[in-house]
Image (spheres, helix red, strand yellow):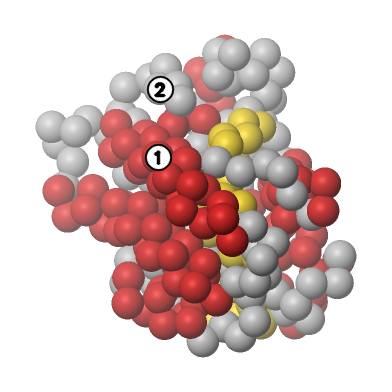
Amino acid sequence: MLGGSRGIGAAIVRRFATEGARVTFTYAGSREAAEKLAAETGTVAEKTDSADRDAVIARVRESGPLDVLVVNAGVGAFGDPLEQDPDEVDRLVRINVTSPYHAAVEAARRMPEGGRIIVIGSVNGDRIPFPGLSAYAMSKSALQGMARGLARDFGPRGITVNVVQPGPIDTDMNPADGPMKDVMHAVMALKRHGRPEDVAGMVAWLAGPEASFVTGAMHTIDGGFGA
Ligand code: NDP
């Protein structure tokens, strides 16, 4: 799993560990949180920066037998595109798009029949109700095309590829008591943030036996943000 030290990723690590899976997850900046989570859950934490494509490919290659790949690592770069640092936008694309693509391809090389590739996108891949989200939304929309295409490429081998698209979820990236909460809740059917565990539940379902016929699809969990 790419990006498991905090937030939604940490909830996914906990969920898979609870279900008895052998989990290896990456982190970049949050070593302390990653090591604590690994010790608590009996999982393995490995430092790998998702901005570094080759490091990500090597990590997937060296991760041993692989039944499920979850790509959760992602960053935001919010603001006026006329003012944004182009290097920041390019870094976002490397983390949110380039590495997920190459990780998915490398994982598929190693997966047996029945393998699962699950990528965390965003409802912003479908809907962008506010300014300042262009680069982030671009990256999350790219994951939709990636999943549809790779589902076709790997379908003959019984490997499924899906995107989970959260709306506002209470994490460091988007705190439930943050300055944007009222603006976001105003466009939602349920006027609150979701919990990381809600997203982990959907990921677990996609990784489980009931989802073996689900592929090339977007699975939105957003409190009606996109409704
Ligand atoms: P957080 O910022 O709370 O956590 C991000 C996680 O990704 C951390 O574990 C972080 O690890 C990891 N990560 C970030 N950059 C890198 C990197 N370069 N290399 C490796 N790992 C990295 O975010 P969330 O939990 O909120 O978001 C998780 C995913 O869900 C993202 O893809 C995000 O776009 C998506 N999402 C979130 C929503 C929300 O409202 N929270 C809504 C829709 C989508 P570390 O700290 O160790 O660097």
Say which residue appears at 33% left-offset and 66% top-offset: 51
- Give residue 39's position: percent from left, percent from top: 75, 82
Q: How dense is the environment of label 1, judged by Cα within 10 Å: few (below 14), some, or many (20 and up)? A: few
Q: Which amino acid does label 2 sit on?
A: Ile
Picture disc at residue 145? 1
- Give residue 75's position: percent from left, percent from top: 41, 51
Q: Mark 2 points at which residue?
A: 128
Q: How far apart are marks 2 and 1 (CA)?
A: 17 Å
In this rendering, would 30 be left or right of 37?
left
Picture quadrant of residue 164: top right
Nearest the viewer among 159 and 35 is 159
In this rendering, would 66 be left or right of 195?
left
Q: Is residue 124 visible?
A: yes
Picture disc at residue 171? none
In this rendering, would 214 be left or right of 172?
right
SS of the residue under disc 1: helix
Q: What residue type is labelled 1?
A: Gly
Instruction: Relative to 67, say whether 219 is above or below.
Output: above
Nearest the viewer among 194 and 58 is 58
Say which residue appears at 40% left-offset and 75% top-offset: 57
The residue most toward the front is: 156
Say which residue appears at 44% left-offset and 32% top-offset: 125
SS of the residue under disc 2: loop
Picture quadrant of residue 76: top left
Say which residue appears at 15% left-offset and 48% top-offset: 86
